Amino acid sequence: MTSLRNKLKVYRAMHDLTQEALAQKLGVTRQTIISMEKNKYYPSLELAFKIAKLFDARIEDIFIYEEK
C-alpha cells in the first residue's frame, strides 16, 4: 500500500499565506487547499509543480510518497 502526504501547511505558514491567499495564487478554491492539507485530495502533477514553483521548492520536498 502507498500513500502521499504533504507539508503544504508548513510551507504556507513559512510564507505567511492564508488558505484563501494560496488558493488565489494557484487558481483553486480554498476547499481544495483544505483538502490537500488534510491529505484527502491529491493534486494533479501540474498543480503540484505550480505549488513547488510558488514556494521555490522541489515537489518531493512538499509532497512525500510513502510505501507501507
Image (tube, helix red, strand yellow):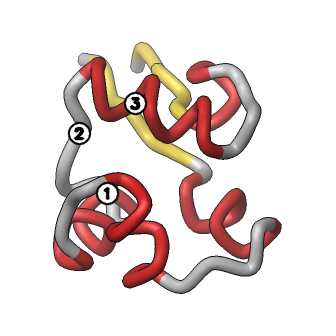
Helix, strand or loop under label 1: helix
Residue 50 appears at what percent x and percent y? 44, 33
* Residue 35 found in image quarter: bottom left
- The reply, left or right, for residue 2 in relation to residue 64 is left
* Residue, disc 2: 42
Q: Where residue 65 sits in the image (x, y, percent)?
A: 47, 21
Q: Secondary structure at mark 3?
A: helix
Q: Amino acid at mark 3?
A: Ala
Instruction: Report the Cα–Cα distance between label 2 and label 1.
Output: 6 Å
Q: Residue at x 46, y 68 (%)?
A: 22
In which image quadrant can residue 45 be found? top left
SS of the residue under disc 2: loop
- Please report contact status of discs 2 and 3: CB closer than 8 Å, yes or no: no
Q: Quadrant of the N terminus?
A: top left
Q: Residues within 10 Å of mark 2 (few under 14, many from 20)?
A: some
Local packing at callout 3 (Cα closer than 10 Å; few below 14, some 14-19, many 20+) is some
Observer-nearest of 26 and 10: 26
The residue positioned 47% from the left and 21% from the top of the image is 66
- Up-down: is 24 above or below 42? below
Identify residue for label 3.
48
Is residue 54 or residue 61 the one in the foreground? 54
- Residue 25 percent coordinates (x, y): 43, 61
Q: Which mark is residue 36?
A: 1
